[in-house]
Every structure is written in C-alpha cells, then in structure tokens.
Amino acid sequence: ESLDDSQVPGVCTTEDVIRYEYHVLYSSSYQVPVLYFRACFLDGRPLTLDEIWRSVHACYQDRLQEGLWDTVTQQEHPILGQPFFVLHPCRTNEFISAVLTGPRKHNRHTNYITLWLSTVGPVVGLNLPLNYAKVAPEQNSNDHSV
C-alpha cells in the first residue's frame, strides 16, 4: 500500500510549517523600536492571535500571562497598511535601560538594536545568530583617509 506525503515519517505538512515575516519600526510615541510580525501556514492561511500565543515558547508564556493582550496585539502596519502582530513597546525602554546599566557603567559598546532584538525576538520565534553580537572593530582615530 502506498503512502502519501502526509503519512511518511519526517515529512512536514503545510499545517506544520509556519512562515514568519518580521519588520522593525521606530515608535515616535514610545521612542523605541517596535517589532511587527505576521505568520502564516504554507497554504497562506494567517495565524490567529490565539495560534500566535500557542506558538510562544513555554518559558516566555508564564512571564507574559499577566498582560497577555497588552504584550502581543494586532494592528495595522503603519507603512504597509496591512494587519500585523506587534510586540507592544510600552515597557521596552524600562527593560532595555535596566540591561544597559552594566555596559554603560563599564564603558562597553553595546548595539542597542541587537540587544533589544535578541531580547524580544525569541518570544515570537526570531532568534538572532551569535555573529550579530560581534562588535565591529573600531576605526583607528589617527587614520584620516581621504
């Protein structure tokens, strides 16, 4: 008896694979970056807000349960005019300021966007590769190339 692809072990169905699209925009109201994202199955069907919440890793769900609908919301993308999910920026400044205290105290360079994105991204499936955390070599201030 022959098996179709959905019955073969190790083969994903269109219901198993989710495609994410991420956009980073700046909120002039909160004066912080904001992560807009949308997700859909391979057949093009978008995930609902409940499906998004079910896809959030358990280690983040407990911490976010208190403000479930304040953390991830759905709104119109300000540039594209299409519905996107948004990680709400209301507490971004508070937690990033706390994280930046150490590097500032020791005069260490910190890439704000990388720090922020590596903190909020994993909540919605966006994990930055480690090479994003590498500090670019500083230019020698004595070099005056023309």
Image (spheres, rainbow, N blue to C red):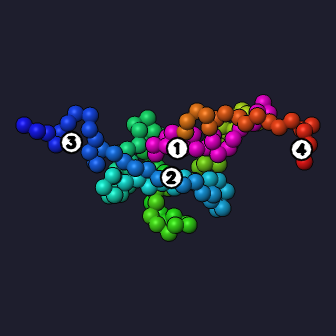
Question: Which residue does the image show at 30% across and 44% down from the upper left?
Answer: 16
Whole-percent x and y of residue 86?
50, 56
Which stretch is magenta?
Answer: 105-127
Q: CA distance from mark 2 to mark 3?
A: 30 Å
Q: Which amino acid type is marked by label 3?
A: Asp
Residue sitting nearer the eye, 105 or 3: 3
Q: Which residue is mark 4?
A: 145
Question: Which residue does the image show at 50% across and 69% down from the upper left?
Answer: 81
Q: CA distance from mark 1 to mark 3?
A: 32 Å
At mark 4, the secondary structure is loop
Q: Which residue is mark 1?
A: 121
Earlier-in-chain disc, 2 versus 3: 3
Whole-percent x and y of residue 39?
40, 53
Residue 21 vs 79, above or below: the answer is above
Q: Which residue is mark 3?
A: 5
Earlier-in-chain disc, 4 versus 2: 2
Whole-percent x and y of residue 115?
63, 40
Q: Which amino acid type is marked by label 4?
A: Ser
Whole-percent x and y of residue 124?
46, 45
Q: Which residue is mark 2?
A: 22
Earlier-in-chain disc, 2 versus 1: 2
